[in-house]
Image (cartoon, rainbow, N blue to C red):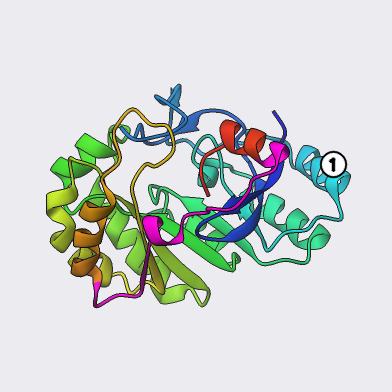
Amino acid sequence: MRTVYGPVPSWRLGRSLGVDPICQNACSFDCIYCQIGPTIKKTYKRDVFVDTKRIKRDLKEIMPIDADIVTFSSCGEPTLAKNLDEILEVVRDIVDLPVAILTNSSTLPISKVRRILRNFDKVIAKVDAPNDKIFNEINRPIKGIHLGNIISGIKKFRKIYDGELEIQTMFVEKNKQYSKELAELIKSLDPDLVYINTPLRPSLVEPLSEKEIKRITKDFEDLKFRSVYEYRYRGDVSPLDKEALRRRPAQ
């Protein structure tokens, strides 16, 4: 599996060049809607999954590249990469583009992770639930991870972060009735933007309808937000992009 993929069309980020610092299905969550499927390696341990030199080589091989942004995304949780800061430095040296990261937020309680994430231009953090009960039902975290700690970690990060903090929230049948509570919780995190999502790509759970998502967005009117049905990519996708999209998580 290559450590660099795309660029792929992203409804959130434009034309995005993906960097995968994990390259395996290793995650601290086992979300019911994950397009990758059930988590194979459930872990909260930060480790070196991919050698930094390998990412540097893969990145150099595809340059120059036509993209809007570089996005750290993975078949697992990218912040579990212990060499995340080294990889970011390599990307900065080779590519003159803003750099974003998609995270499930589970490592935000770790001060070292917060310090590393400060160096990204954009951090997109996940919050899908307003309480531990729904959190455990939807995100199915590894034992020992609690929503309260994650929320506290995001708030601590917000205080030290000058870049764009964005929150993505995935709505499915299990949490759709909690949209008002979720909106209030997310508002307390002071995000620059909120992405309201539902699994439109193949998933083990059904997406909510456009009508249902439109109803949910009314609870977010006090926040700047984008809805997947309004912003999803509708243009032509090249064969290379289709292959990248098939093998990788949505950006």
x, y (%) of residue 64? Answer: 86, 55
Q: Quadrant of residue 148?
A: bottom left
Residue appearing at x 66%, y 46% in the figure: 19
x, y (%) of residue 147? Answer: 24, 50
Residue appearing at x 18%, y 58% in the figure: 179
Location of residue 151 with respect to 147 vertically, above or below: below
Location of residue 97 with respect to 190 vertically, above or below: above
Q: How many marks?
A: 1
| SS assignment at label 1 | helix
Location of residue 78 with respect to 124 vertically, above or below: above
Residue appearing at x 30%, y 40% in the figure: 207
Please say whether residue 156 is one of the residues in the magenta stretch: no
Please say whether residue 234 is one of the residues in the magenta stretch: yes
Which three-letter amino acid code belongs to the residue tagged 1? Arg
Whether residue 188 appears in this view of the structure is: no
Which quarter of the rendered picture does the N terminus lie within? top right
Label 1, residues with CA under 10 Å away: few <14, some 14-19, many ≥20:
few
Q: Quadrant of residue 211?
A: bottom left
x, y (%) of residue 30? Answer: 35, 31
Query: Which contiguous range is marked in magenta?
Result: 221-241
Seen in the image, is 53 located left or right of residue 146? right
Seen in the image, is 39 located left or right of residue 96? left
Whether residue 96 appears in this view of the structure is: yes
Residues 160 and 39: in front is: 39
Residues 199 and 57: in front is: 199
Residues 78 and 149: in front is: 78
x, y (%) of residue 195? Answer: 38, 61
The residue tagged 1 is 57
